[in-house]
Amino acid sequence: MDTRRRARAAGAVVLAVVALALAIGFSGGRTGADSGGRTEVVASFFPLADAAAHVGGRHVVVRNLTPPGTEPHDLELSIDRTDLAVVLGDDFQPAIEAAARRRRGATLVALDVAGGHLRADDPHVWLDPARMSEIVDAVASRLARVDPEHARTYRTRADRYNAVLQTLEREYADGLAGCSRRLLVTSHDAFGYLADAFDLDQRSVSGLSPDAEPDARKVAELADLARNKAVTTVFSETLVSPRVARTVAREAGGLRVATLNPLESLSAGELRAGADYVSVMRANLRALRTALGCT
């Protein structure tokens, strides 16, 4: 992945740390006694923060790094004093991960525990609920190491959240089993893990950078494929211009443009509505079922 593309992806993903904080009541962080004796966790983006909050509950303060709606390419970090840092890995967010490597405290690298990073140019492992569950398990184990007094509580809460994720996985498997189409056309390559998990074929115009200029040849090829496979919908994503998706849809003969959320961030409206990982994943499932003609 080139530097520009990685930087754009890093900026997009880290937006959601505070988004989830606002959605489910995370603390803005602690300094000294402000934590009230609770274990402090810094998470670098939305799914990792979600895991830490669900596992830790009242025993954990999750400190978030970036407010929603910003592009933190030059993010300044201060995570040295936190009890646990949770990052994605593979140098996906270079500034965050460099700071995590320098710190003395415990660090969890999510890609090391999420079933292997099988798609070299796609870091969105959290869009597969089974891999998200593996991250939750790893967070529980690391929290138990740094705060053994509450280890049993962390394990219980992780099991409870994993039960929700397993239900979500079954909903996807059942909901996408009887579809008339399996081809998922997207403006950029963010849904590969989700597609692999549920036997879909994702095709996209561009790689990880949704703002990159679309390649005219790839647009034409994807439009031809969409026509040949009777595709009805081209997916854009939240917080990103739908320009590329609209271009493909127009070239393919006026297809519908809909939205999938890669769960890199939450909008202000989603925050006000109390959205979280599971609710957004269920909204994605509804959109997929409509687009793919599922019964």
Image (spheres, rainbow, N blue to C red):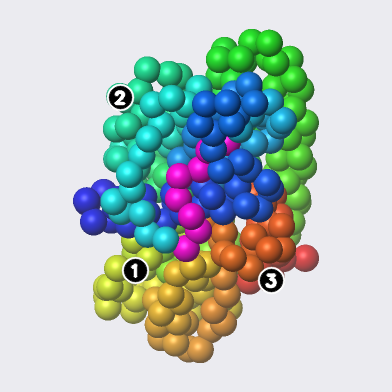
Q: Give the residue pinned by disc 1.
A: 211
Q: Give the residue pinned by disc 3.
A: 290
User: Which residue extends farthest left?
Assistant: 3
Task: Measuring from the top left, give residue 185's x and y in whole percent.
Answer: 49, 68
Disc 1 + disc 3, Cβ < 8 Å = no
**Neighbour tally class for label 1: few under 14, some 14-19, many 20 plus, Cα within 10 Å:** some
Q: Is residue 19 above or below residue 232?
A: above
Q: Of the residues tagged 1 and 2, which is closer to the observer? A: 2
Q: Of the residues tagged 1 and 3, which is closer to the observer? A: 1
**Helix, strand or loop under label 2:** helix
Identify the amino acid type marked 2.
Arg
Q: Give the residue pinned by disc 2.
A: 102
**Helix, strand or loop under label 1:** loop
Q: In the figure, residue 132 lies in which quadrant? A: top right
Asked whether residue 90 is in view, the answer is no
Q: Main secondary structure of the magenta part?
A: loop
Magenta extent: 62-69
Residue name at image x 23 percent, y 56 percent = 4
